Image (spheres, rainbow, N blue to C red):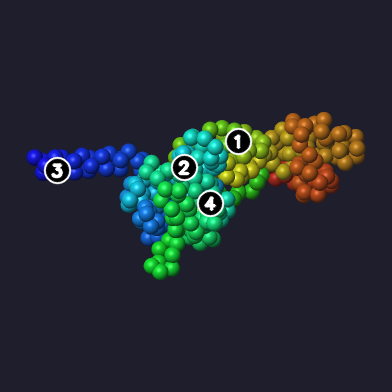
């Protein structure tokens, strides 16, 4: 009878452990799989990249779960949205471990031993430039947790593989056509999303696929791109650096901006040179500056501009007309 009860109890324990493992959500981790252990005399080995769970280091905070062989799951923060976040550590729903450059502060939580302080007096945890954790965290119920040691050698290390997307074939800032094809590159990129101006981000797109923009309205536009790495971690939207594109469909010499280079442009140019006319009275877009419409880029309408326009008129007239 006792044997049956004992067997039943063992079976129940295994079921509970299985449920606990399943209950912890699997998450992308950027902890080095070969260097993932911290040590506590009471909690035992603590894996920051266990088979289920895992800790993710972001630019300003940590998320996810570590697993301690004697106390179970340790949660690094109440937030799970990635990107940019700061734990205030003032209530039950805003606690966690923050990262400020190379130092960590704030609290992790264990259902078994309670709060774990990453910046205690006489201790503290830091991350060096190579991603290696150093120092001690403190738990009132389990004592010190050590993140690196020389003998026996162990440490926790972060693989700095946060995605950063960028446009790598930068076009001229001002384009004379309303379409453009762009290549997305950067670091640690497997996919990306983009948005134009104040629009919504596109759906996820493979990094090998180019961005094709067409039928762009005239004016200046801002293109934003964010990337995703192989672990499924997205670059934070606020870190996207906008690419500026100006669409100007008119040709050099089209002074009145009507879409054609013709005699009216030459006449207008001569009137402007003589001070008879104010060019702003003739522009379709009154916000255009003189420096944007002169041919040779000297910031004024001069004789070189007039000669260019007349040559363009003669060239166009000499071309055979289609019938």
**Tag 4 and tag 1, C-beta contact below 8 Å:** no
> From mark 1 to mark 3, how far is it between C-alphas?
65 Å
| Residue 235 % position (x, y) | 51, 45
Disc with the residue nearer the chain's start (1 vs 2): 2
**Which residue is identified by label 2?**
77
Residue, far left: 1
Q: Position of residue 183 (x, y in %)?
A: 51, 49
* Left or right for 173, reference 84: right
Q: Where is residue 297 in the image (x, y as percent from the top left)?
A: 77, 49
Which-is-in-front pick, marks 3 and 2? 3
Disc 3, SS = helix
Residue denoted by label 1: 197
Q: What is the CA distance from the residue labelled 4 to the residue labelled 3? A: 43 Å
Residue 34 located left or right of residue 87: left
What separation in Å lies between label 2 and label 4 (alpha carbons)?
A: 17 Å
Question: Looking at the image, do the residues carrying marks 2 and 4 touch, with CB atoms under 8 Å apart?
Answer: no
Q: Mark 4 points at which residue?
A: 120
Distance from Cα at disc 1 to Cα at disc 2: 34 Å
Discs 1/3, front: 3
């Amino acid at each position: 009878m006792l044997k049956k009860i004992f067997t039943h109890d063992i079976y129940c324990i295994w079921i509970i452990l299985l449920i606990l493992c399943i209950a912890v959500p699997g998450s992308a981790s950027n902890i080095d799989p070969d260097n993932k252990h911290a040590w506590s005399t009471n909690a035992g080995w603590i894996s920051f990249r266990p088979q289920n769970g895992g800790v993710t280091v972001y630019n300003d905070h940590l998320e996810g779960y570590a697993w301690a062989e004697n106390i179970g799951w340790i949660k690094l923060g109440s937030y799970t949205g990635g990107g940019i976040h700061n734990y205030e550590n003032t209530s039950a729903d805003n606690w966690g471990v923050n990262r400020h450059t190379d130092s960590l502060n704030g609290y992790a939580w264990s259902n078994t031993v309670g709060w774990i302080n990453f910046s205690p007096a006489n201790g503290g945890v830091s991350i060096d430039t190579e991603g290696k954790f150093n120092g001690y965290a403190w738990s009132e119920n389990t004592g010190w947790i050590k993140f690196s040691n020389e003998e026996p050698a162990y440490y926790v290390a972060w693989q700095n593989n946060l995605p950063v997307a960028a446009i790598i074939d930068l076009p001229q800032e001002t384009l004379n056509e309303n379409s453009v094809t762009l290549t997305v590159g950067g670091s640690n990129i497997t996919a990306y999303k983009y948005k134009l101006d104040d629009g919504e981000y596109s759906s996820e797109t493979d990094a090998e696929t180019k961005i094709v923009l067409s039928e762009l309205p005239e004016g200046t536009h801002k293109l934003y791109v964010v990337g995703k790495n192989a672990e499924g971690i997205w670059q934070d939207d606020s870190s996207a650096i906008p690419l500026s594109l100006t669409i100007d469909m008119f040709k050099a010499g089209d002074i009145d901006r009507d879409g054609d280079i013709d005699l009216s442009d030459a006449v207008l140019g001569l009137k402007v040179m003589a001070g008879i006319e104010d060019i702003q009275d003739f522009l379709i877009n009154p916000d255009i500056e003189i420096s944007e419409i002169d041919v040779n880029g000297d910031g004024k309408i001069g004789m070189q501009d007039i000669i260019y326009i007349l040559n363009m008129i003669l060239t166009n007239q000499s071309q055979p007309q289609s019938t």
